Image: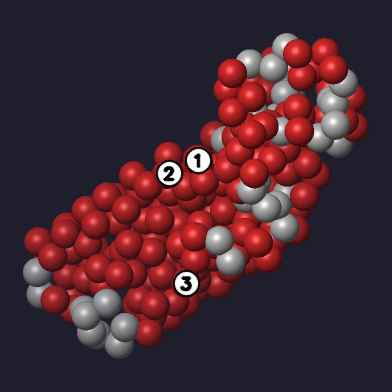
Amino acid sequence: MQADASSSSPRSFEWWMISNLAVGAGFSAFVALLIPPYVTEVTGSAAEAGVIMAVMSLAAVLGPVLGGLADRYRAHRLTMSVGIFAMAFAFAAFALAADSSTFFPIDAVIMGVGVAAVSAVAPAYIVGAGLDKKMEASQLTTFNLVAPVGQVLGGALLGAAAAAGMSYSDRFWISAGVLLVAGLLTWFTSGKATKRLHAQLYASTEGGDGDALDSASPAAAANESTAAAKPKGLSSVLLSTFGVYL
């Protein structure tokens, strides 16, 4: 399977890493600069803004659960992309709130779960893809640097929007649009990286040689039995409990 992994020609920067730029721009810039002052303005309470941010952070702890389900259903690409789309949806929902705080907690949960999905799955594309140590280190460095780049770009974009006198609603729409584009880029550029990842994670179930099966670790054997028992088609994933949750 190593030959299959190398055939996808991994590079230090791959376009699916836009997913981490989306987290940097979305969570570290758009959320931090928009939601606390917006919630405070609408509700008149800074404490309520703190509660909304706490709900968002609490929802983000679902990352390990989402990562485990993505492994189980071979849905890494779907989970990572849907996570970004969920963030875009949450910003659009804030834009549509029209000075009503009724749905703020729900929006916060959607945002937190979206961030959790990306943060849990995206690093697996590097550490679980069977890359050589030099390339793995190079990709991890690049991947980690993309987030602060997104934070800087997102902050600059919102600063320009505020200087232009745009309303909170307009700024939320801009944030949603940026993340929508990032989600589409992530989906359409992550195909090869997904194949590379799955070639490593599910090598023992893809008709590999006998030596690979004989030397499989207990964890790999568990992955094999789980993968063999579960459907792998996109429609099957979407109609499963996991798909409904997403």
Instruction: Using the image as rendered, state which of residue 12 and residue 217 is in the foreground.
Output: 217
The mark tally for this picture is: 3
Residue 233 in the image: x percent, y percent? 72, 58
Point out which mark residue 65 bears. Answer: 2
Q: Is residue 36 left or right of residue 125?
A: left
What is the quadrant of residue 181 in the picture? bottom right
Say the numbered circle drawn on residue 68. Answer: 1
Q: How far apart are the alpha carbons under marks 3 and 1?
A: 24 Å
Q: Mark 1 and 2 residues: CB-CB less than 8 Å, in contact?
A: yes
Choose mark 3 or mark 1, whichever is in front: 1
Instruction: State if disc 3 and disc 2 touch (CB < 8 Å).
Output: no
Screen quadrant of the N terminus: top right
Mark carried by residue 113: none
Residue indicated by mark 3: 89
Instruction: Left or right? Give the position of 44 relative to 244.
Output: left
Q: Amino acid at mark 2?
A: Val
SS for callout 2: helix
Check disc 1: other Cα within 10 Å, few if <14, some if 14-19, many if 20+. some
Q: Looking at the picture, which amino acid does disc 1 mark?
A: Gly
Residue drawn where x is 10% and y is 75% of the image: 44
